[in-house]
Amino acid sequence: MVAWALTAEKRGQKATVKEHMNEAGTIGGTIRTLFAKGVRFTTVIDLGCADGHFFLFNYCMGSFAGACPVNIDANPIYGGSLNAIKNVLGGHFVIAAVSDALGETEMTNAVHPYWSSLRPPDDPYWERINGMSQNKTLVPTVTLDALKERLNLQPPFLLKLDVQGAEAAALRGARETLKETDVVIVETDLDDFAAINGILEEAGFALYDLTEIKRIDHDALGWFYPVYLNRRLQAIRARAFWDPVQNEDIVKQQKLRRQAILSKNAELLELIRTSGRAR
């Protein structure tokens, strides 16, 4: 395992990247939990990988030891970063958009490449990022099933998608690959979640965790990364909310909680009466 000790700037220098990635509610934390439960991947496929940090960071955490990285992105700006990863860790990188058909399509570029999308300029997606679209680029399209055969990718797979609204098409082109996939991680916003969830449920996956929850103005739910587990691995799920040995303590906690609620209720009711706000 490679030691990892980069400082997380946004956390006031109080925690390392390693510590942050192991936290509950993060992608890395969930992957580490699955690793502890014995889940291993032969191939990690990252669609919309950008500079390839997802595989690299989790490899350095030990979660992807021995796995083959397959980094895929439509934007050639990332080619240098992905080639550097390949030179050190092996695997593959592909500059193409993943969809449900082979060929080519138009990608609408955004003011930052992270937001570029196969969705047309009039799609509601662009409204959600304040219309920050630019020109269009013609990009090659591949299907994940075709890539799996061409590159002779070996299961079990972890599949991550961060493709700015093209997730449904990418999943439609991965029907055979999904049969050999154990875990799917996908970036989605609230508007797209229902369609993605439906496709993965139909493909034999169940929602395992919600990670990286981001909120927008007025604290409304914005975007997040649901993690799906293939139903053939259902046995690793914890079914009870707590360990049976904790039953007595849990009951005591509930009794104390009710006592605290009743005490607070009485305090608030007295405050209402004395303030003249009672009906």
Image (cartoon, rainbow, N blue to C red):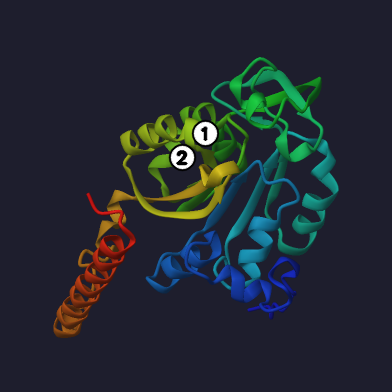
Query: How far across and down, in percent of the image, does residue 46 sit?
Result: 61, 47
Quadrant in the picture for the N terminus: bottom right
| First of labels 2, 1 by sequence position | 1
Question: Would residue 237 appear left or right of 149 to someone viewing this image?
Answer: left
Q: How far apart are the alpha carbons under marks 2 and 1?
A: 6 Å
Q: Quadrant of residue 156?
A: bottom left
Residue type, mark 2 in image: Thr
Mark 1 Cα shell of 10 Å, populated few (<14), some (14-19), many (≥20)? many
The vertical placement of 138 against 13, above or below, is above
Task: Identify residue for label 2.
Answer: 177
Whether residue 95 appears in this view of the structure is no
Query: How far across and down, in percent of the image, does residue 264 sit?
Result: 27, 71
Tag 2 and tag 1, C-beta contact below 8 Å: yes
In depth, the one of 204 and 220 nearer the eye is 220
Question: Residue furthest toward the top?
Answer: 122
Q: Residue at x 70, y 39 (%)?
A: 73
Q: Residue at x 19, y 75 (%)?
A: 254
Question: Would residue 24 appear left or right of 87 to someone viewing this image?
Answer: left
Disc 2 is placed on an element classified as: helix
Query: How far across and down, in percent of the image, does residue 47 sit?
Result: 61, 41
Q: Residue at x 58, y 48 (%)?
A: 45
Disc 1 is placed on an element classified as: helix
Query: How far across and down, in percent of the image, does residue 190 sit?
Result: 48, 36
The vertical placement of 208 against 60, above or below, is above
In depth, the one of 184 and 110 nearer the eye is 110
Residue type, mark 1 in image: Asp
Task: Identify residue for label 1.
Answer: 145
Mark 2 Cα shell of 10 Å, populated few (<14), some (14-19), many (≥20)? many
The vertical placement of 197 against 236, above or below, is above
Whether residue 43 appears in this view of the structure is yes
Question: Would residue 260 appear left or right of 179 to someone viewing this image?
Answer: left
